[in-house]
């Protein structure tokens, strides 16, 4: 089992009545009314410190991601964050998981090939190369990519990046969307033929088709928990079976919100305000922004509608505003409580979904810096060691940097490490 800390880096101080006064947290929230650049600088530094703390605490990987024009998670450049993390964790056997640079919006895409090459060199071969398609909000509305072109651009960008990493000779690229007269990439990754590639998704058939054809790791990034995600992950594993591929759990990743405290009651008292903040404010996305027409291709849209994926998520979003802490935990959106409670819930989720690469969101919504560090500390000491051996007696993680595939050794806890608060 490989477990990494995922961080969104949301704006932690939105107004109490944000969701009533403002149209959306994404695309059109007014910076000049809502944000303070001094605070944002503090958030970036706290975020980096929290991820480094997780690395020092012994987690297998640390994850960053790319989003634009929002207060939900605004790492506009994941590779800037990744470069700090790669350098700061230089002596650690922790993976730098970039989840990652968005292919269709990075023009030309060899910029991703170059920056991932830099990160793999700086980290000494510890990069996991995420290749997201991008959300409709980011790609279509913020960066102006036509929804009908987005997936075609993605496939072409992927092919160009892979060729740029591996070609022995200078080549010209004369594609539909990108034309480059002389591609001769400097630098190239240490990991050959390329770093492990993970592709995040939301249950699209086209993404499943792509990752199984390419033999990449598929990562279902959902904030609706393992129970509501069961049908989607079952669908993915049926897809894998039909294609005759081995059902290796490391072929799949999953994102889960996790909060840990000394007792179940204390977890509710400490974390519920921040869980409520996350679901009320950080996911306050205008519905017309969520899926621009053409963003989902026909067969994926048909599959999502027939199987009720979109309907289920809409129903949950409508109910969630009235939920108490126990509703979030009982429905699996949040795995929380004492260390023993969290271990039991998390192991059940991992086994039911059959995932080998787990990403845990240990900073949620408005969670302050010191409480985030506590959550990381308790998770790494009291939960993580009890899950590390899952799957390892049967399967090899082929989607992880080769030099890090062995079990990570205990590092003595993050409390002994140096972090600037």
Image (tube, helix red, strand yellow):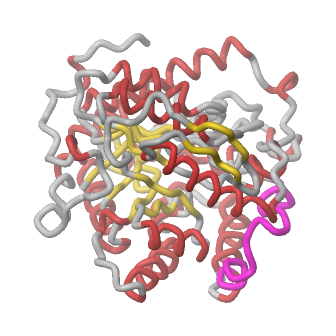
Give me the residue at 29% from left, 22% from top: 90
Q: Where in the figure is residue 204, as x and y percent of width and height?
A: 61, 72
Residue 301 magenta: yes
Give me the residue at 46% from left, 24% from top: 83
Q: Where in the figure is residue 235, as x and y percent of width and height?
A: 49, 82
Q: Where in the figure is residue 372, as x and y percent of width and height?
A: 43, 31
Q: In which quarter of the image is residue 266?
A: top left
Q: Where in the figure is residue 279, as x and y percent of width and height?
A: 64, 51
Q: Is residue 194 above or below residue 353?
A: above
Looking at the picture, tell me which residue is in the foreground, 120 or 81.
120
Give me the residue at 86% from left, 22% from top: 32
Give me the residue at 52% from left, 18% from top: 45
Q: In this view, does 366 lie above or below 226?
A: above
Q: Give the range drawn in magenta.
A: 286-304
Quadrant of the image for the N terminus?
bottom left
Residue 262 magenta: no
């Amino acid at each position: 089992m490989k477990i990494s800390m995922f961080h969104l880096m949301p704006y932690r101080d939105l107004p109490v009545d944000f969701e009533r006064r403002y149209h959306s947290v994404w695309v059109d929230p007014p910076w000049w009314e809502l944000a303070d650049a001094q605070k944002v600088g503090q958030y970036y530094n706290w975020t980096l410190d929290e991820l480094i703390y997780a690395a020092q605490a012994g987690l297998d990987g640390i994850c960053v991601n790319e989003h634009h024009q929002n207060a939900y998670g605004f790492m506009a450049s994941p590779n800037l964050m990744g470069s700090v993390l790669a350098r700061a964790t230089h002596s650690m056997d922790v993976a730098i998981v970039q989840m990652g640079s968005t292919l269709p919006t990075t023009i030309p895409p060899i910029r991703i090939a170059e920056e991932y090459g830099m990160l793999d060199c700086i980290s000494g071969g510890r990069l996991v190369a995420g290749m997201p398609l991008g959300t409709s909000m980011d790609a279509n509305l913020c960066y102006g990519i036509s929804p009908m072109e987005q997936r075609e651009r993605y496939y072409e960008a992927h092919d160009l990046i892979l060729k740029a990493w591996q070609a022995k000779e200078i080549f010209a690229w004369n594609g539909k969307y990108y034309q480059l007269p002389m591609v001769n990439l400097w630098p190239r990754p240490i990991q050959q033929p390329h770093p492990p590639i993970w592709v995040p998704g939301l249950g699209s058939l086209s993404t499943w088709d792509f990752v199984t054809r390419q033999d990449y790791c598929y990562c279902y990034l959902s904030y609706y928990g393992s129970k509501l995600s069961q049908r989607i992950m079952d669908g993915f594993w049926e897809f894998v079976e039909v294609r005759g591929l081995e059902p290796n759990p490391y072929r799949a990743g999953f994102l889960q919100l996790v909060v840990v405290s000394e007792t179940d009651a204390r977890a509710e008292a400490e974390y519920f305000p921040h869980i409520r903040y996350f679901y009320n404010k950080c996911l306050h996305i205008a519905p017309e922004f969520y899926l621009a027409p053409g963003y989902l291709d026909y067969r994926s849209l048909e599959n999502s509608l027939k199987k009720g994926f979109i309907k289920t998520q809409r129903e949950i979003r409508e109910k969630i505003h009235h939920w108490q802490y126990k509703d979030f935990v009982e429905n699996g959106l949040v795995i929380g409580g004492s260390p023993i409670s969290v271990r039991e819930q998390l192991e059940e989720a991992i086994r039911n979904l059959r995932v080998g690469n787990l990403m845990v969101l240990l900073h949620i919504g408005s969670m302050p810096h010191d409480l985030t560090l506590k959550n990381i500390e308790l998770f790494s000491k009291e939960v993580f060691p009890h899950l590390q051996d899952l799957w390892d007696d049967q399967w090899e993680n082929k989607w992880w940097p080769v030099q890090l595939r062995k079990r990570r050794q205990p590092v003595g806890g993050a409390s002994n490490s140096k972090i600037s608060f």
